[in-house]
Image (spheres, rainbow, N blue to C red):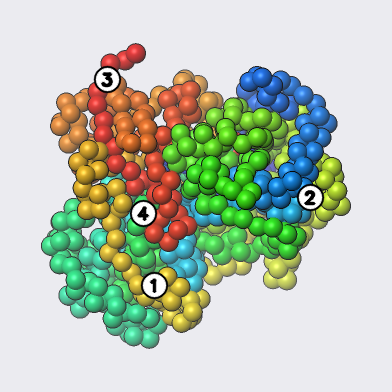
Amino acid sequence: MKEIRKAACPLNCWDSCGFNVTVENDKVVKVEGDPSHPITKGKICGRGRMLETRTNSSQRLLHPLKKINGQFEQITWEHALDEIAAKLKEIKEHYGSTAVLHSHDYANNGILKNLDQRFFNCYGGVTELYGSLCWGSGIEAQKWDFGKAHSHGPEDITNSKHIIIWGRNVARTNMHFYEKLLEVKKKGAKIYVIDPIYNATAKIANQYISVKPGMDGLLAAAIIKEMLRLGLEDRQFIEQYTHGFPDLAALLEEISAEQLSEMTEVPHEIITQLAQVYADKPTATYMGLGLQRYTNGGNTIRFIDALVAISGNIGVAGGGANYANLQVGQSFVFDELTLPSRKQNHRQFSIMKQAEEVLAAVDPEIKMIIVTCGNPVTQVPDTSVVEKAFSSVDTLVVVEQYLTDTARLADYILPTSTAFEEEDIYYSSMYHHYVNYGPKLVSSPGEAKPDLWIWTELARRLGFGEDFEFSREEWHKMTFQSLEKKGVTLEQLKEQQTVELPVDTIPWQDYRFQTPTGKFEFTSLLGGPLKLAVPEESKWKNPMLAENYPYSLLTIHPLRSNHSQNYHLFPSEPKVKVEIASNIAEERSLQNGDFVRVWNERGEVKGYISVLVTAHPNTVNIDEGIWKKFGGSVNQLTSSRESDNGLGSTLYDCLVNLEKISLK
Ligand SMILES: Nc1nc2c(c(=O)[nH]1)N[C@H]1C(S)=C(S)[C@@H](COP(=O)(O)OP(=O)(O)OC[C@H]3O[C@@H](n4cnc5c(=O)[nH]c(N)nc54)[C@H](O)[C@@H]3O)O[C@H]1N2
Ligand SMILES: Nc1nc2c(c(=O)[nH]1)N[C@H]1C(S)=C(S)[C@@H](COP(=O)(O)OP(=O)(O)OC[C@H]3O[C@@H](n4cnc5c(=O)[nH]c(N)nc54)[C@H](O)[C@@H]3O)O[C@H]1N2
Ligand code: SF4
Ligand SMILES: [Mo]
């Protein structure tokens, strides 16, 4: 019998869509949008629709596997879990629990995916990762400036006169925001896109501003300088609600407008025009995550925040320095779920440098790595070091749905369920503030089991089984405690499928910032003054490097895949596409379809040229996520350096060279 069930998208994405899933004979046959979802309104993207394929594909991992003499062999769950538990026990006794590294990312937005942390905390505390490849620099930057990263609710954009899309690839990564942009544009709002690539969002903008990659902080500084010159700043806001403005003004005295224009490669007239746009309030700023994946990423976001602040666009309808919306995730209670108090030992590695840290670890060395909800061999920078580190440990356990590049290196692969095979609750702290319910719709194929079942079984074997004796309903109730006090209940969510979380839809309206001074901090008591910083891999910081490797490589998010999740499921085999600005095509006599080698001191990637007519000069892009067998990973080229505030990646701060080669 065929039925249509409501469900939720689990993918790590801005949009957190509501689904209508057609189920027939215990099988998912179609994934569509749920028209009744208040934000996503029945529209979903190809990645969402492909969850049908991800559920049913014959490439799914169906049985636990153990590598014996270099070959994977099927073993029973009993066998796999007994052996892994015995190793965990032995490692803890001989080396201490921090000899285990938990490597993870956020492949699945389900609340109960956090129970892996409960397992590791009850085990005694392992080596954990801190920071974020994704948005770390910007989150920390907004913590310094505002106290927290909060965004305006999706509807508030209808109040904006001008909308600046600053390094967010909206049409590709955040489709419901794109729909909103089309809607408000029709009503007269003006849209500006600031990006080194003339992307699909730029096509609908009233104006496209091309900027040198990594130079947005200086562009914001230039606009501030121009606003001050023209007297366009909001003096009242600056005087009453901010801290450290004189430091900023003094810093801007040190550099000329001409110099800023030259370095950002944005003409001075455009800077003047943007100063006027910011003054003609309300102007909303929507930042993406691409622009902070640079060594100067924290300062970039802080300068953009400062621009929004001096122009008086904070705490007003239609304004905002919109980056992420941590209010969403903070609606839930996690400590009772993850039990941090149970940790006896503790060690942290940076997520960016996890591979180097594994290789360098002493006291204790890393004996085992357990990977959940992540594919580090493809997604973590500097792949060759990642491969080395993940191959170096005695035991690598990978909990996966597919035989990814990371899983291939494993000693044990534990096959796990996909989202429609287990019940959970999904949200994203990126765009809207609705949480969605995802019921279990079908059984898992073969012997695949939910991650939670795996933790429960391992916990039982390690003597803390009682810590996992809760039903999904009970776990979910734990996270809903503070919401229930505000009248939002789990029952409501299950009945309505989605509920609005009680968050501020116009943050900072009361001008009470959560910083140490209670003000917006141009000079942060936590992080210090703003700095006019440039990318590490640039002609200013490293002229020799820039001479040998003259092009800036971006590795932006792919259209049809969430990171590495879909490439192997495409109907035709994916190829590496090397997109280049037209000046590079001219300099190197390259045309569409040419086969090239892109390289730097970390590695090389080969692929086919596609010329971007309107990209910023000297810019190259290769979409991230592509598997080794299809020519990846692009992270062969990227650096594991951390951003200025230590918590973000520098994935796009990457210089390369390229040359035409013949097809093998
Ligand atoms: N289709 C698709 N959608 C996704 C994802 C996916 O993998 N595929 N992933 C999801 C996740 S986890 C995330 S974090 C988000 C990311 O969402 P976005 O922030 O939209 O995505 P990015 O690909 O990081 O880059 C966004 C834009 O930044 C621009 N950019 C790069 N460097 C600079 C710079 O120095 N200055 C400026 N001004 N712009 C710059 C790029 O050209 C690109 O247009 O997307 C989510 N949505
Ligand atoms: N060069 C470059 N590198 C990047 C980026 C970039 O822009 N450029 N983007 C960065 C960003 S923003 C992010 S967020 C990261 C993403 O990095 P990852 O989260 O590591 O990327 P995914 O490809 O989504 O890989 C997740 C893996 O988890 C598995 N998985 C899915 N659901 C589950 C589940 O329920 N349980 C378990 N155990 N496994 C599951 C999937 O099969 C998949 O193989 O990549 C970062 N890396
Ligand atoms: S990947 Fe994002 S846009 Fe696509 S269906 Fe899922 S939540 Fe919606
Ligand atoms: Mo991300």
Point out the frontmost of discs 4 and 2.
Answer: 4
Q: Which residue is mark 4?
A: 295
- Going by the numbered disc 4, the residue's amino acid type is Thr
Q: Position of residue 262 (x, y in %)?
A: 15, 56
- Going by the numbered disc 1, the residue's amino acid type is Gly
Point out the frontmost of discs 2 and 1.
Answer: 1
The quadrant holding residue 548 is top left
Q: Is residue 227 left or right of residue 390?
A: left
Q: Is residue 634 left or right of residue 189?
A: right
The quadrant holding residue 559 is top left
Q: CA distance from mark 1 to mark 3?
A: 48 Å
Q: Which residue is mark 2?
A: 472
Mark 1 element type:
loop
User: Which circle marks residue 15 in the picture?
Assistant: none
Q: Image point 72% across, 59% down: which residue?
A: 343
How busy is the neighbourhood of tag 4: few (under 14 within 10 Å), some, or many (20 plus)?
many
Q: Earlier in the sequence, mark 4 or mark 3?
A: 4
Q: Which residue is mark 3?
A: 661
Q: Which residue is mark 1?
A: 528
- Going by the numbered disc 3, the residue's amino acid type is Ile
Q: Earlier in the sequence, mark 4 or mark 2?
A: 4
Q: Earlier in the sequence, mark 2 or mark 1?
A: 2
For this rendering, which residue is in front, 590 or 646? 646
How busy is the neighbourhood of tag 2: few (under 14 within 10 Å), some, or many (20 plus)?
some
Mark 2 element type:
helix
Q: CA distance from mark 4 to mark 3?
A: 31 Å
- Going by the numbered disc 2, the residue's amino acid type is Arg
